[in-house]
Image (spheres, rainbow, N blue to C red):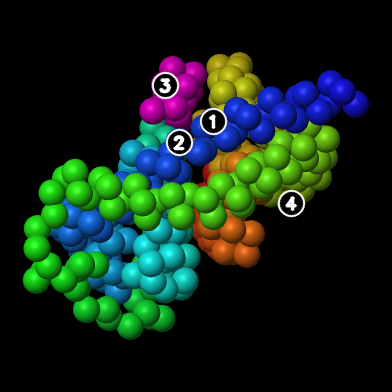
């Protein structure tokens, strides 16, 4: 019992150490941008996306931040929502869009693994993951265009107000950030502790076992289940097993890619609940965070399943 408590506290501390600094940066930066009235100037680079989706320009600033730090970007969205700059519906759509920069930036971790181990098939697999992420973004943008009403492109602070110095902006941002961060941390800390407890209790390992058994519903050769099983451990383990099977000639490169995609679908359920769930819920609260996680995961997996079906039956990869 004592060891379990220590493990839970340690894991929770690690998760909080990774999450909280980015949240603080995101909220504070959002407040600085609002105080300086430059959010719209930065968002000009993403204006075609926000304009098409009928989102406010502030959401574009968050989208760009997501290429650097997704937690900070989502914290910015919450800050804008708290100040009633964006609605709850805009918050959910913008947060779902923010997942695409996260997928793109995964090249830093995926390519150094997949290319050395799998070569061209690894590069193709990564490209398909990018395609799925892009398709998900397009779908959510079309949804936003359909349900949102065009908003006036007015800045958060009227142009008539006198210019604010950087020092004044920092002071204003710090004062307003403390109130928001107090609310955020009151949700984040207990949420992360609960997630850490569930991880150490083996709940997610049990769920992974159930999802692994669902692999039989997909067009995967018997040899491919070793890859899927390894993917539940880590993407590095999955790529290593796939590399061995490919080198031995037990599976074709098409079957390898198809199996990796199927494994990605199955592992995404536990991965989303374990990591994205704790991240979204910690930032946006239980209700909104769970909704964003559900929308993002279902949309991504739906597109991934369609892609698997096209490759397996349309192109005869299965």
Marks 2 and 1, Cα distance to the nearest angstrom? 7 Å
Q: Which residue is mark 4?
A: 217
Q: Residues within 10 Å of mark 2 (few under 14, many from 20)?
A: few
Taking the spot 41% from the left edge, 21% from the top edge, the residue there is 112
**Disc on the earlier residue, 1 or 4:** 1
Q: What x and y, as percent, mark residue 99?
A: 44, 50
Q: Is residue 77 above or below residue 251?
A: below
Q: Which residue is mark 3?
A: 112
Relative to 26, 168 lies left or right? left
Q: Which residue is mark 1?
A: 17
Taking the spot 43% from the left edge, 65% from the top edge, the residue there is 82
**Disc on the earlier residue, 4 or 3:** 3
Which contiguous range is marked in magenta?
Answer: 108-124
Q: Is residue 170 above or below residue 82?
A: above
Total numbered badges shown on the rendered structure = 4
Marks 2 and 4, Cα distance to the nearest angstrom? 42 Å
Please report contact status of discs 3 and 2: CB closer than 8 Å, yes or no: no
Q: What x and y, as percent, mark residue 3?
A: 84, 21
Q: What x and y, as percent, mark residue 234?
A: 62, 28
Residue 61 is tagged as none
Marks 1 and 4, Cα distance to the nearest angstrom? 39 Å
Please report contact status of discs 2 and 4: CB closer than 8 Å, yes or no: no
Residue 55 visible in this rendered orientation of the protein: yes
Name the foreground residue: 277 vs 170. Answer: 170
**Disc on the earlier residue, 3 or 2:** 2
Please report contact status of discs 4 and 3: CB closer than 8 Å, yes or no: no
Q: Residues within 10 Å of mark 1 (few under 14, many from 20)?
A: few
Element under disc 3 = helix
Residue 21 is tagged as 2
């Amino acid at each position: 019992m004592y060891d379990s408590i220590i493990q839970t506290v340690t894991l929770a501390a690690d998760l909080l150490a990774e999450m909280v600094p980015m949240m603080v940066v995101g909220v504070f930066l959002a407040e600085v941008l609002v105080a300086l009235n430059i959010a719209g100037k930065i968002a000009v680079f993403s204006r075609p996306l926000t304009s098409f989706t009928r989102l406010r320009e502030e959401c574009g600033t968050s989208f760009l931040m997501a290429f650097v730090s997704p937690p900070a970007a989502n914290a910015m969205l919450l800050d804008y929502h708290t100040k009633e700059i964006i609605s709850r519906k805009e918050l959910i759509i913008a947060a779902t869009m923010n997942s695409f920069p996260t997928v793109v930036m995964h090249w830093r971790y995926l390519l150094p693994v997949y290319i050395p181990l799998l070569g061209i098939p690894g590069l193709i697999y990564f490209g398909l993951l990018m395609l799925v992420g892009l398709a998900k973004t397009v779908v959510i943008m079309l949804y936003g265009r359909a349900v949102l009403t065009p908003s006036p492109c007015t800045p958060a602070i009227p142009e008539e107000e006198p210019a604010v110095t950087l020092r004044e902006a920092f002071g204003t941002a710090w004062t307003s950030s403390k109130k928001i961060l107090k609310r955020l941390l009151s949700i984040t800390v207990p949420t992360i502790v609960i997630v850490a407890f569930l991880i150490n209790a083996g709940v997610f390992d049990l769920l992974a076992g159930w999802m692994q058994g669902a692999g039989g519903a997909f067009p995967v050769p018997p040899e491919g289940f070793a890859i899927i099983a390894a993917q539940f451990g880590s993407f590095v383990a999955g790529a290593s097993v796939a590399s061995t099977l490919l080198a031995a000639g037990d599976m074709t490169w098409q079957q390898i890619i198809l199996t990796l995609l199927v494994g990605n679908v199955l592992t995404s359920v536990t991965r989303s609940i374990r990591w994205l769930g704790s991240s979204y819920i910690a930032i946006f609260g239980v209700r909104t965070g769970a909704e964003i996680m559900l929308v993002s995961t279902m949309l991504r997996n739906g597109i991934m399943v369609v892609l698997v079906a096209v490759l397996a039956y349309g192109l005869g990869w299965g």
